[in-house]
Image: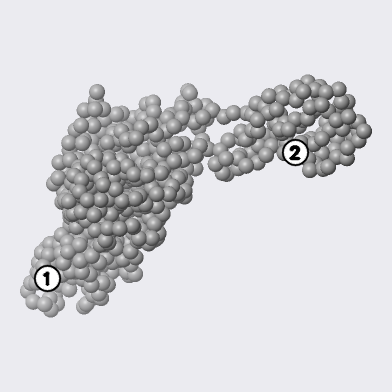
Amino acid sequence: MIRRHLHFNRMFALILLSLLWYSTSISYAQSPLTSQLVTLTCTGSPCDEGPSLSTQAIVWPASLGPLTNRLGYTASAGIYLPSNAASGLTLSITSGTATVYAGLPDAESHRILAMLSSGQSHLITGLGADEVVSVQSSENTFAYSLTTSTTCTDPTTCNPVSAIPAFWRCNISGCTYPDWTGAVITWPEWSAYEDNARAGSQSRTVYTAQGEKLYPYMGSWAEGCQVTAVSGMVLIIEWQRGTDVWRNTWLQPGQTHTISLTSPEDGALIEGPDGVLTPFGVSLTNCSPQIIEKPPTPTPTNTPTHTPTPTPVISGPLTIGETNILGADDSGNGNVLIAQQVVLPQNATLQSLSFYVTSAAGQLRLGIYDDAGGTPGALRAQTAAFSPVMGWNTQNVETPVLLPAGTYWLAYLAESDDLHFRVEASGSGRYYSYPFEAMPTTFSSSPSSGTFHFSFYATLQVDPPSTSTPTSTPTATNTPTNTPLPTDTPTNTPTATPTSTTTPLPTDTPTSTPTATHTPTNTPLPTDTPTSTPTATPTSTTTPLPTDIPTSTPTATHTPTNTPLPTDTPTSTPTKPTLVPDGTQPPVKIYLPILLRR
């Protein structure tokens, strides 16, 4: 099958890329960027520092428009980044030292924004409109990573631009597959498509976690668009809309690709790795959206209407994190508490945590922390210490906990440096030294940060959506008696068992209160008084409360007769099919969604 063929080729290619790009230690999980030796040569005046000088500096991607000239000197590469591109970038030094400077290009001196050493970061802010930024070191080469902290996601108004967490949702009736997840660059509605126009259950429309449509599928105007990865891993898809084949181009930070469509290709997509909701950042050149002619959105023949829900509707098991077996091996993280960022799209109860091991040693603990402004905060749950085995290790948390939708951090703590596992240099991670014991109730407020994530996921249980089916009390069958029945029809609340008498009731229709005490009369009581609450078929429609189980008690209209009461038949709602495959192993998703998502 073509799907299997593509699946194998992609797996093989990613493993090769992983082996080339990533090391086996967490210290190498950062973006592999290093400074370059730059020579500044006097080509004008005043040239106060002599005919030439050299420095270690960050050479910015050409797509960001860096400058090379300052005070009569011309640099051998672009080291002065304009403020409109530098603002919002977070610079992290992973080895060596560096100084961040800012000022006007023709100023005699530039002010120092930060002096950074290994493990330190700085968010570039507070720049003037015409200022430039440079990062230099008079010492040896330094290594660094860049992430974008800008919240701008509109490529028509900012550059670089951030991706948006995205959910590819079935747009046909009866689809039993869960959402595909990732992050995308989205475009104005008039210039791009919200769906992939594919067939069957692979026909997907893209939404935010709040249920708003995204428009990531570029039209033919994508031709010639130059994409440079600024932060995170970036995947560029070039394809013919609606088909099942395409071309993949992976970029790591600093790398550039120019979209070149080959007939019959007519569009492109800029996205991140499967299942990674952490936004990436890109710089775009020659990407000018154009109006596209969209045919009327067809209504699937088996779906008269389709209203997207405000959040991904999943009933049953839900996983967050990395369920794929990644390509690069990692080890040496004993007595280090490490966390990777994940996003939970809807409220769910945490059940278990799963971690993939390639070589077992020592003991292991798994846990989950909530988010505290972009870093792990309070511990929400953890597993007991256990001895891992080769393969997936799934452990129940000590106490299941209900987690609201939002950002969380999956954490692990290994006892031995000889424990091996799988890693990829994408996503957001935090770590610091911590002895092997129960995880701390609060994560460190000053951990080291990196761009990495592991084969590590959480399994949660989502309760089915609430329905209008009331909770029914078993129905007792009344034996009729000869006691004269009232002629009116009282409305009883089915929570009490009133004692009936032959005393005539008023001719109007009062609402009887089940807590009233009836005074016995000389009229014999009925020979059979039910001890259970009659629960006839409710005649009112109950609106479901926004909780998992309706708590309202319906008021039933009960007309006493000499005929046995009907058996209670509450209105039932068909059970929603489970959207996650059954079984103890994680969903079979190893790189497959990338073949389904386009």
Percent position of residue 472, x then y: 64, 33
Instruction: Name the element at disc 1.
Output: loop
Q: Say left or right for 190 vs 148.
A: right
Given residues 592 and 25, the one toward you in this image is 25
Query: Would residue 441 be visible to someone looking at this image?
Result: yes
Relative height, residue 454 to residue 246 (above, below): below
Image point (41%, 54%), residue name: 380
Q: Quadrant of residue 510?
A: top right
Q: Say left or right for 387 vs 21.
A: right
| Amino acid type indicated by mark 2 | Ala
Relative height, residue 59 to residue 491 (above, below): below
The residue pinned by badge 1 equals 139
Q: Quadrant of residue 186?
A: top left
| Amino acid type indicated by mark 1 | Glu
Given residues 251 and 595, the one toward you in this image is 595
Q: Say left or right for 496 vs 472.
A: right
Image point (17%, 73%), residue name: 71
Relative height, residue 82 to residue 422 (above, below): below
Image point (12%, 62%), residue name: 36
Instruction: Name the element at disc 2.
Output: loop
Given residues 486 and 67, the one toward you in this image is 486
Residue farthest toward the left in the current orientation of the protein: 51
Q: Say left or right for 14 vs 180.
A: left
Percent position of residue 463, x then y: 49, 39
Q: Name which of mark 1 and mark 2 comes first in the sequence.
A: 1
How far separated are the C-alphas under marks 1 and 2?
85 Å
Image point (65%, 33%), residue name: 473
Percent position of residue 161, x then y: 33, 53
Q: Which mark is residue 496?
A: 2
Percent position of residue 49, x then y: 11, 77
